[in-house]
Structure formats: C-alpha cells, structure tokens
Image (cartoon, rainbow, N blue to C red):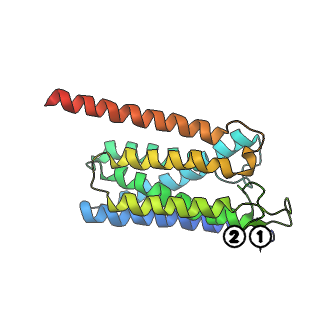
Amino acid sequence: MITISKINFPIYVTIIFVSIFLGMLYVALSLKKEIKLGNNIYLYFLLNILLILFLGKTFTMITSKSLNFLTIGFSSYGGAIATMLCSFFFEKLWDLKGYLIKYSAISLPLIYGLSKIACFIAGCCYGIPYDGPFSVTYPDNLNIPLFPAQLLEAITFILIFIICNKFKNKKNIVLITICSCAISKFLLDFLRYEHINRIITFNQIFSIIIILISIIILIKRKIDSKKIK
C-alpha cells in the first residue's frame, strides 16, 4: 500500500504545466518535419495554453460548482476542447494542410496521461475503495485504501499516445485518437470514487457524446468516399 501526504498546490500546477509544455513540444517537433514553420506558430502555442487553462478550469467550476477559479483543478475535457478549437482556428487561418489538427489531437493523450501524475500525487481524482496491490492512501483526505485510478489513466493514455503516434499517417487518425481517448475515459471513470452511487458521471456523458459524433463522422466519410468512387 502506498501512503501519500498532501503536497503544496504549486507542485500540482508545475506538473500540469510541464505536461502541457511537452505536448506542445511534440506538436512543434512533428510540424517541423512536415512543413516550414514561421515564428507566428508561437502565437498558436501561447493562445492554446491560455485557452487550455481557461476552459480547463471553467469546466471544473461547472462540474464541481466551485467558484475558486485559482485553486481548483483542471478538467481534461475542457483542455481538450480548447486545444482542438485553437488548432481548427489556426489550421484555417494558415492552411497547414491538416497537420496542426492531426498532431494537436495526438498530443491530447500525452498531455492528459502526464497530467494524471499530478492528480495521483495531489490526491485528486482518486479511485474507488480498494485494499489490494498498489492501493494508495491519502491521510489528509479519505484516509482509506483506494484504487490508483490516476496511475492507470496515466499508463492508458500514454499508451494511446504512443500507438496513435506510430500510426499517425493512417487515414482518420484524428477521429481514431479522439474516439480512443473518449472510450478509455468512459471505462476508466467507473474506477473513480466519484462514480460511487452514480449511474453515470458528467465525464461519461461527455465521452458518449464524443464517441457518437466520431462514429457519425466516420460513417459519413465512408459513405462520401463510396459516392466519389
């Protein structure tokens, strides 16, 4: 069993910022291999980070009904929506041939996976009661053995990133990446403490919406491709 005492909030924030930075670094290095980057690409990264922080916290405020904007955590779906909105906008603005959208989408599981390490250390987003191997206890919180849901999420999403990056040149990789993340998020949410006494959580509802939209788009693309033939 692992016991973790409460950490200072700046440590949590630092890990979150490092995960976002590494995600942006992946996008920058990947774009550099595909197209010639101008200095204006830094505008995308700056606005993307600001939007991630804003929507990430805004979504948390909505779901947790908390008004402590500075001290609340970050919503993964808020951050993901921020990244995709930003990438769609700059993709249209600069005509980057779909590369920005693709690599921004693939960076999402990397950023989320790394950020869950912050959640594990901080003791937020903890798992269901569990007294087995690798269980974790937060003395400053529930003080009972819990399932290490954050670590399982971290491993799962980093694996999604590795696999999707390997097949980055496959057709519909953006939708496949997003759908894979949504399915994983939906299933892993059953292992979170907040799922106790709930039939379905906000994250799971949002996951279902994203999965359905992705499937509809994939079906539409398949029908359109048949019409062209």
Q: Considering only vertical position in the picture, is 167 above or below 213?
A: below
Can residue 36 be seen here? Answer: no
Q: Considering only vertical position in the picture, is 30 above or below 204?
A: below
- Residue 127: mark: none
Q: Position of residue 73 (x, y in %)?
A: 69, 54
Can residue 152 be seen here? Answer: yes
Badges 2 and 1: C-beta atoms under 8 Å apart? yes
Q: Where is residue 119 in the image (x, y as percent from the top left)?
A: 68, 61
Q: Could you tell me which quadrant the N terminus lies in?
A: bottom right
Front-lying residue, 75 or 205: 205
Amino acid type indicated by mark 1: Ile
Q: Considering only vertical position in the picture, is 20 above or below 174?
A: below
Q: Quadrant of residue 161?
A: bottom left
Decide: few, some or many residues near mark 2? Use Cα within 10 Å; few <14, some 14-19, many ≥20: few
Q: Look at mark 2 in the image and give the residue it sits on.
A: 11
Q: Where is residue 172 in the image (x, y as percent from the top left)?
A: 31, 45
Q: Position of residue 61 (x, y in %)?
A: 71, 43
Q: Which residue is drawn at 48% across and 38% down?
A: 211
Amino acid type indicated by mark 2: Ile
Furthest residue toward top: 227
Q: Look at mark 1 in the image and give the residue it sits on.
A: 7
Query: What element does badge 2 sit on?
Result: helix
41 relative position to 147: left or right: left
